[in-house]
Image: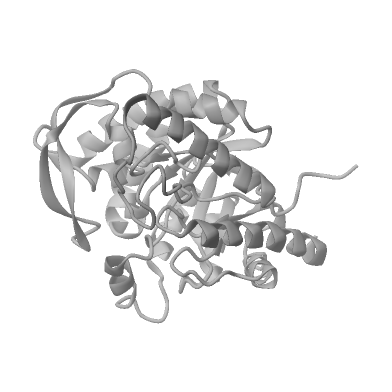
Amino acid sequence: MSGPLLFPTTVAGSLPKPSWLAEPNRLWAAWRLSGAELEAAKRDATLIALKAQEDAGIDIVSDGEQSRQHFVHGFLEFVDGIDFTRKVEIGIRADRYKALVPTVTGELRLKGRAHAAEARFARAHTKRKLKFTLPGPMTIVDTIADRRYGDKVKMAMAFAQALNEEARGLQADGVDVIQFDEPAFNVYMDAVKDWGIAALDRAIDGLACQTAVHICYGYGIPANLDWKATLGAEWRQYEAIFPALAASRIGQVSVECRNAKVPMSLLSLLGRKDVLVGVIDVATDAVETPAEVAAVIAEAAKHVAKERIVACTNCGMAPMRRDVAAAKLEALGQGAALARQRYG
């Protein structure tokens, strides 16, 4: 009798949106439809995203975040206490770049459910394991202006409470994996250990489904590429936080590995966590070969038990051309299959 599938595949979350839904090749792209037409188009795009993943052999699929303009603000729209009419420009990710963000003006409370409709729709249209993504508390705090709490930790815990309510709802909707996206985790190393992981643990409180946190160095946009160029030959930021993540209650940690300068040996600091190994580079249109994907998996297996490796993309694919993303998904599926043949 065979055991669990070795090197199952998944995506970090987002996939490109069709050009009829939103302007292609852009982050935060505006919707091209409105009202009932927009809602129908989001559902159509979700079906396409699910089918593309299934056709590519992806084992744990997502809705591709087709119903959200942005991974943070798509959730914030459903939280009371946030004024979207009072947008201000702030520096985020330690002032790496500036963004126009809404303002917290009142007590933060979830309005009801944020993503029930899209989670239930996706669940009804795939028999594969389903992942759903939410922004992490620290990254939300770093992507919003505060005129109410005056304390990042208090505000993060308030967001963690709202996230936990939504996550419990998603679990009840039949979601198998709930992933929290925390790109801020490689920017504020001391804060991650002081309160970031505590906020993350609060967000997953009481969940029985698989939980994950995605950390990375960001999309391949100019501000991120310029920042990466300053980080030297080795990116060792994670050395400071991986032991703390190993001690957290989160089940899986998603890390970019393909074309990254993160020493693969650092993965051993994650202890017995499952590791979503990024084998697909989302910052280039060059499509990986299955052999290249398998090679990254093999390198990771030197530091992580094989049964704890999940093959994944480095980050979301939202700003990528759809044809490139489709080819990369195929490479992911084929590369993991090749790794099973070689190393299983």
**Is residue 259 shown to the viewer in this render?**
yes
Examine the rendered structure and indicate whether residue 172 appears above or below residue 70: above
Q: In which quadrant will I find the N terminus?
A: top right
Residue 272, image x, y percentages: 60, 50
| Colour setup of the view | one colour
Residue 149, image x, y percentages: 13, 33
**In the displayed image of the protein, which residue is found farthest to the right?**
1
Residue 88, image x, y percentages: 10, 45
Examine the rendered structure and indicate whether residue 99 appears above or below residue 133: below
**Is residue 195 shown to the viewer in this render?**
no
Identify which residue, 134 or 255, lies in the foreground. 134
Q: Residue at horizontal 76%, vertical 47%?
A: 5
Examine the rendered structure and indicate whether residue 199 appears above or below residue 292: above
In the rendered structure, the answer to whether residue 311 lies left or right of residue 35 reads right
In the rendered structure, the answer to whether residue 228 lies left or right of residue 175 reads left
Snapshot quadrant of residue 102: top left
Q: In which quadrant will I find the C terminus?
A: bottom right
Q: Residue at horizontal 41%, vertical 70%?
A: 236
Identify which residue, 248 or 188, lies in the foreground. 188
Identify which residue, 125 or 172, lies in the foreground. 125
Q: Residue at horizontal 31%, vertical 58%?
A: 189
Residue 192, image x, y percentages: 33, 51
Snapshot quadrant of residue 146: top left
Q: Residue at horizontal 46%, vertical 43%?
A: 248
Number of dots carrying numbers: 0
**In the displayed image of the protein, which residue is found farthest to the top?**
112
